[in-house]
């Protein structure tokens, strides 16, 4: 089948999209990707790992609009026009695969125009994801738009049971889970070999995840090493965390690391940190990539209570869940550092979960089944 993917961010940095594209290509499908390069960082037309990429850059008009929410309709229109041009020039796609709500309107237009199948790959519940950054007016529009447009899709792919239940209430389309799990490294548990107990955090930097304060908290714990791999999304906070890290000899700030090195750094740690704010609706329902990274490495994780990662950690007994409090996080780190037997027990539970269910091979099969059912 010929598949057109729509994505509102850079393909090279979205590991979920990349893994899905690779799996579909290996299964014999032909894929092209239209994405939104908002900062004009890359070429308009490109080939990345064999995938033909077509980037939409912000026009002068788009730059005049205050914020990406208002730029979205222009992005939808321009991606639609680009897709139709590809369709008319030989890439007559059978399926449009839309990643998240900010691509779905264009996907619906493609289905109406060409009669193609439409797959909605919902990584998040979009309204909850944006509610901390925009006014309630735009949040309500997002929920309304999603409820309206999902009625047009042929298949919904999403990331966990909580999101499946949400979409089941607003759509009659079949729904399948494709979790952001990682490839298994080994089915045999291997303990870390660190001389100093090492805590690892790789992900986005947010004040709601206690950055930059958590650097000072962990930096002052004796006989602990703290390794930070950070996405360079919020430059001011990124630089603040980098500066704070330099004050402590036991804190290593890696900056942004390549996606194919994340699991390697995770394996070198003793415990993975996943502090999310339970007062945020997105934390209550979203999955955390670092949880699946910890699982395939056989490493325990520290999560906050009343979050989706916390619930999964409690269910699988693969880490420690704590109150949303820096002091509690510190206590959990110290507890694990002084109890290698507990660390190993939780790490073995994590690896068992990865082997039994939470690995990319099983999730990839779910994805491929979607496309078999679309034929």
Image: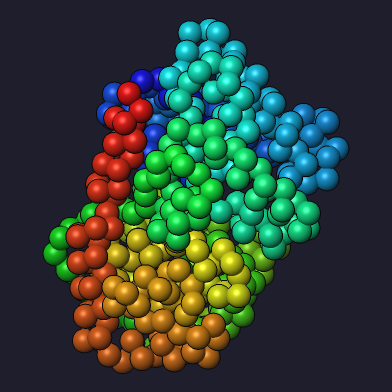
Residue 316 picture location, percent across and down: 29, 73
**Residue 183 drawn at (x, y percent):** 27, 51
| Quadrant housing residue 54 | top right
Q: Is residue 169 above or below residue 114?
A: below
- Can residue 39 be seen at all in this image of the molecule? yes
Which residue is depicted at the point 41% across and 87% down? 332
- Compared across the picture, whether 23 is left or right of 252 comes to left
Residue 148 sits in quarter:
top right
Residue at the extreme left: 188
Q: Is residue 39 above or below residue 210?
A: above
**What residue is shown at x 56% (from left), y 80% (from top)?**
214
Q: Position of residue 307 (x, y in %)?
A: 49, 72
Find the residue positioned furthest to the top. 89
Taking 362 as reference, is 355 above or below it? below
Image point (33%, 40%), residue name: 367
Image vertical order of residue 111 relative to residue 188, above or below: above
């Amino acid at each position: 089948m010929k598949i057109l993917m729509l994505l509102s961010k850079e393909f090279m940095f979205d590991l979920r999209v990349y893994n899905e594209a690779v799996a579909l290509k290996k299964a014999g499908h032909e894929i092209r990707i239209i994405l939104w390069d908002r900062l004009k960082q890359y070429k308009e037309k490109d080939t990345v790992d064999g995938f033909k990429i077509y980037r939409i850059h912000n026009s002068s008009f788009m730059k005049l609009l205050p914020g990406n929410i208002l730029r979205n309709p222009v992005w939808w229109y321009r991606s639609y026009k680009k897709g139709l041009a590809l369709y008319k020039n030989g890439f007559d796609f059978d399926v449009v695969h839309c990643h998240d709500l900010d691509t779905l309107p264009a996907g619906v237009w493609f289905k109406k125009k060409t009669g193609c199948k439409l797959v909605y790959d919902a990584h998040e519940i979009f309204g909850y994801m944006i509610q901390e950054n925009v006014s309630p007016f735009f949040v309500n529009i997002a929920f309304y738009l999603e409820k309206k447009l999902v009625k047009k899709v042929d298949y919904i792919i999403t990331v966990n049971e909580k999101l499946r239940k949400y979409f089941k209430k607003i759509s009659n389309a079949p729904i399948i889970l494709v979790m952001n799990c990682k490839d298994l490294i080994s089915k045999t548990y291997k303990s870390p070999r660190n001389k100093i107990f090492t805590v690892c955090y790789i992900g986005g930097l947010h004040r709601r995840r206690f950055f930059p304060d958590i650097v000072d908290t962990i930096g002052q714990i004796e006989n602990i090493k703290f390794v930070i791999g950070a996405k360079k999304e919020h430059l001011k906070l990124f630089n603040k965390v980098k500066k704070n890290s330099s004050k402590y000899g036991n804190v290593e700030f890696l900056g942004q690391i390549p996606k194919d090195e994340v699991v390697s750094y995770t394996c070198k740690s003793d415990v993975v940190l996943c502090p999310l704010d339970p007062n945020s609706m997105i934390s209550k329902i979203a999955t955390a990539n670092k949880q699946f990274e910890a699982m395939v490495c056989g490493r325990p994780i520290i999560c906050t209570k009343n979050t989706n990662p916390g619930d999964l950690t409690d269910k699988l007994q693969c880490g420690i869940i704590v109150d949303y409090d820096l002091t509690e996080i510190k206590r959990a780190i110290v507890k694990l550092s002084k109890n290698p037997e507990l660390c190993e027990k939780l790490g073995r539970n994590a690896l068992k979960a990865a082997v039994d269910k939470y690995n990319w091979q099983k999730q990839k099969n779910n994805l491929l089944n979607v496309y078999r059912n679309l034929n």
